Image (cartoon, grey):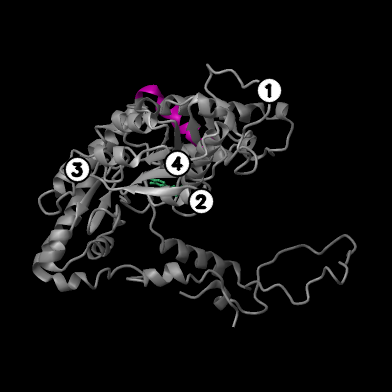
Amino acid sequence: MKLIFEKSKPGVGCSVLPPCDVPDAPLSPQAARKTPLRLPSLDENQISRHYSALAKRVFGVNDGFYPLGSCTMKYNPKINEELADLPGFTGVHPLQPEHTLEGCLKVLDLAAQYLCEIAGMDAMNFQPAAGAHGEFTGLLLFKAYHQNRGDTARTKIIVPDSAHGTNPASAVMAGFSVVNVPSGPDGCVDLETLKAAVGPDTAALMLTNPNTAGIFDPNILEITRIVHDAGGLTYYDGANLNAVMGIVRPGDMGFDVIHFNLHKSFSTPHGGGGPGSGVIGCKSFLTPFLPLSGTCRAAALPSPEAGPSLSIGRVRAFRGNFLVIVKALAYLFSLGRENIPEVARNAVLNANYLMEKLRDKFPPAYPGPCMHEFVISLEKLKASHGVSALDVAKALQDRGMHPPTIYFPLIVHEALMVEPTETESKETLDEAAAAFLSIYRQIQEDRESLHAAPRNTVIGRPDEAKAARQPVLRYTAP
Ligand SMILES: *Cc1c(COP(=O)(O)O)cnc(C)c1O
């Protein structure tokens, strides 16, 4: 497909500006452009077709099943978009006087109350714009807490090897070093290894529970106790809350800080680079360190007394991505107290249903039951038939679905990480299982053809290393 610049023809256009009826006010020569602005010239029909053609090349939740593990690509009800589009929310400016923003401040307050209740935390801060940004902010709180107590030896963050890659990256960005602890054969944290890893240099542990293998760690209370006993703090990576929301609270598991990805579990679409929100929550002893703007406390807590600020400062302008928070609140209101746990139950049910339908031919890496996602290992199929996780993922694309996450978590060889989400019907799950099983037959009958998949997509097998290392992000005019 040609770029819009390549379709451009000089002189073609669709500008319909009326003649200017005020006198020209020429710019000074220093401020004026030396060369004309390079904009494509096309007629309206061509522009419309260009963008429609681009839209057809994309695969999203509106096109089909999208079980991308760890990403929670669920259907987001359109009503929440409409509510976030109300002029009272879109027409405000963060520098307006507070008394003219009362409705919006109430939204933040209510969202904080509910998120505190779901997380088992005492305060929320809305500034972080994404999950990794929330991690970074949470780790800065830990750093400020230890430093404020004069405990400067705590420089290490413990991260299990099943962690999302952002965890060690955020720890390094926040100035810590990372201690990687290997998981046990059951995919969970090995208690003896953890005991050996903690000490007077431990700043904190970062953990995802259920972890990226879709397993809820049965020793979670013991794990957070071991870290606290050693003087460390505990960070809950709550990017995906689908398995536990309304059922069990990270604060009750012994965690001090959590981040949510509102753009995964709470009704903001993601994957296209749009705005997100990595809201962080913390226990009350950490609230003095939160960014001053964008913080809301649970109803029971008084505001802090005025005094020298211990705040880590700002991590972003103003109070965060406000409209994302509106959508999260609309979503929570529409579900209500009784249906929030229902989301979690259905997410877990759907994952277990699909895992069991595939178990014989595509064995899970851990026996299960799983939580909101499960991981298949194709290690044996690769050894016996030479077919990789990548081949299966590409073959699924030919069958009209988005492939699962592949080669993650890193601790599972030839991993396919499947997260169906609660918004898919039994029919969709049955169709997905049928697609997987037809690939299994293709492996038995004609495995060579799999290496040529996909055949039905616009792009087949791009050079992924080159796309990541040498991305071409700008058009250079010839
Ligand atoms: C998605 C995800 C993150 C990072 O979130 P971003 O918004 O992409 O920065 C962190 N941890 C886990 C477990 C995730 O799934």
Q: Where is residue 322 in the image (x, y as percent from the top left)?
A: 58, 38
Mark 3, ligand 1, within 8 Å: the answer is no
Residue 187 colored in magenta in the image: no
Q: Which amino acid does label 4 sit on?
A: Asn
Q: Which residue is drawn at 89% across and 64% down?
A: 25
Structural distance between the alpha carbons of marks 2 and 1: 31 Å
The residues colored magenta run: 326-338
- Per the picture, the main secondary structure of the magenta-coloured stretch is helix
Q: Where is residue 453 in the image (x, y as percent from the top left)?
A: 25, 69
User: Which residue in the structure is indicated by mark 2?
Assistant: 173
User: Which residue in the structure is indicated by mark 3?
Assistant: 186
At label 1, counting other C-alpha atoms closer than 10 Å, the crowd grade (few under 14, some 14-19, many 20 or more) is few
Disc 3 secondary structure class: loop
- Name the image quarter holding residue 446: bottom left
At label 3, counting other C-alpha atoms closer than 10 Å, the crowd grade (few under 14, some 14-19, many 20 or more) is some
Q: Which residue is drawn at 52% across and 47% down?
A: 174
Structural distance between the alpha carbons of marks 1 and 4: 31 Å
Disc 4 secondary structure class: loop
Q: What residue type is labelled 3?
A: Asp
User: Which residue in the structure is indicated by mark 1?
Assistant: 306
- Name the image quarter holding residue 99: top right
Whether residue 51 can be seen here? yes
User: Which residue in the structure is indicated by mark 4?
Assistant: 261
Looking at the image, tell me whether mark 2 or mark 1 is earlier in sequence order.
2
Looking at the image, tell me whether mark 3 or mark 1 is earlier in sequence order.
3
Instruction: Name the disc covering residue 228, or none.
Output: none
Disc 1 secondary structure class: loop
